[in-house]
Amino acid sequence: MADDLSESFAEHQAKSHTPPQDFAVHATRSTPSQRILAAGVLIAFCIWASSVIMTLLFAVLAAYFLDPPVSLLERMRVPRALGALIVLLLASSLVGGTGYLLYDRVDSFSKDWPRYSKVLRDAATEVDKSMQKLESRFSEITPVETKNTRTVSVEEPRPLRAFLIEGLGSFYSILLLITFVPFLVFFMLAAKRQIWHVTLELFPLGHRGRAKNILDEMSRMLRGYVAGNALVAVIMILASYVFFSYMGLDYPFLTGLVSGLLNMVPYIGLVLSWAPPILIGITKWKVLAPYLEVAGTLTALHIISMNVLIPAIIGRTVRLNAVALTVGLLFWGWAWGAVGFILAIPIIATAKVICDNVEGWEPVGRWLGSS
């Protein structure tokens, strides 16, 4: 994609009758307060239009991930639109086939769910009894003056309308992703050169060289991030599957898939990855040792992925310091939920690329990338 962008930029410069140096670009330098205000407005818009922005970002990441095979087909004399359609259909078939293979396992697990839920209810009951005993003993030690009157609080049920509105909001977000992402990805892949060309035309002639550098660097960063994460996710899923099969867990592939993906989440993913194998193992393991083995092995996998695999595979393309990464994950996770954790790193990395190449914003870019 970067090579195509360079060709598009060269073609545009060749067609231009007036060289860039003949134009004097007079831009008013913005003040720090104006930059902060602009950033606040942009963030507020992202939160307000979260469904649309998330759909667009997912489409952009998917387009960068699928662009190499489309470019390969184009070099083999296949028209780009046809190549984009072929690659998109193959990717959709792969996702659909994976979902079909998982359906039987999910269906079997749903039939066995009463067996697991009974153990969970019994455990919750025992914990509740222990808490009641602890509270009664504490009240005997520290008596408190009470009145004869007893206050009873009744929680009003939430109206049905509130549940319907909340459900429709989630359904609307999912519908946007399922419906629009394939079309957006196809259009981005098929009309890539035209999109790059008109994007460069948004900038004054004297600034198009810098804009081209930003887009080139963003292309390399996003493609490396998506491909690297996909590779690390496959490694984590396979490693979890092999370990759970060795432990004799039921549904090892389904458990390994969920646990491996959760283990990819920075920071909290370590604890989240424990939940699936512990849930499956509660009907089989009656001693503490297997649970400790699961926790220790998944912790080791998390440490290897975060400190060895990700730095080696993705670290060259995404350079962010720990503070910026943590703050970004907290903010976008709060704003967009689970989707925010997925999109936080590419958003921050893109912001760093822009700051590195925009005059006046270089200190922010250096801070985001400082180690």
Image (spheres, grey):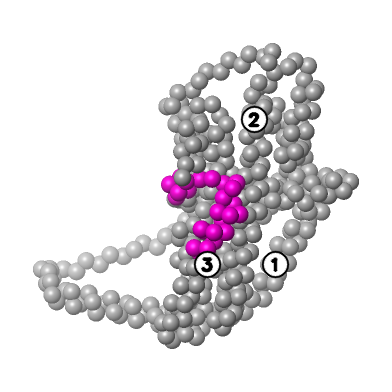
Return the residue at label 1. Answer: 98
Return the residue at label 3. Answer: 301
Q: Nearer the viewer, mark 3 or mark 2?
A: 3
Q: Position of residue 228 (x, y in %)?
A: 63, 54
Q: Label 1 sits on what residue type?
A: Thr
Magenta region, mostly helix, strand or loop? Answer: helix
Q: Position of residue 45 (x, y in %)?
A: 52, 38
Q: Tell me where the magenta segment starts and ends, as one range.
A: 301-326
The residue closer to the viewer here, 229 or 369, is 369
What whole-number distance in Å separates the C-alpha atoms at marks 2 and 1? 39 Å
SS at mark 3?
helix
The residue closer to the viewer here, 94 or 179, is 94
Q: Label 3 sits on what residue type?
A: Leu
Relative to residue 369, is residue 24 depicted above or below?
above
Cβ atoms at labels 3 and 1 below 8 Å apart: no
Give me the disc on residue 211.
2
Q: Label 2 sits on what residue type?
A: Ala
Q: Which of pointers 2 and 1 lies earlier in the amino acid sequence? A: 1
Q: Nearer the viewer, mark 3 or mark 1?
A: 3
Q: Is residue 177 visible?
A: no
Residue 304 drawn in magenta: yes
Q: Nearer the viewer, mark 2 or mark 1?
A: 2
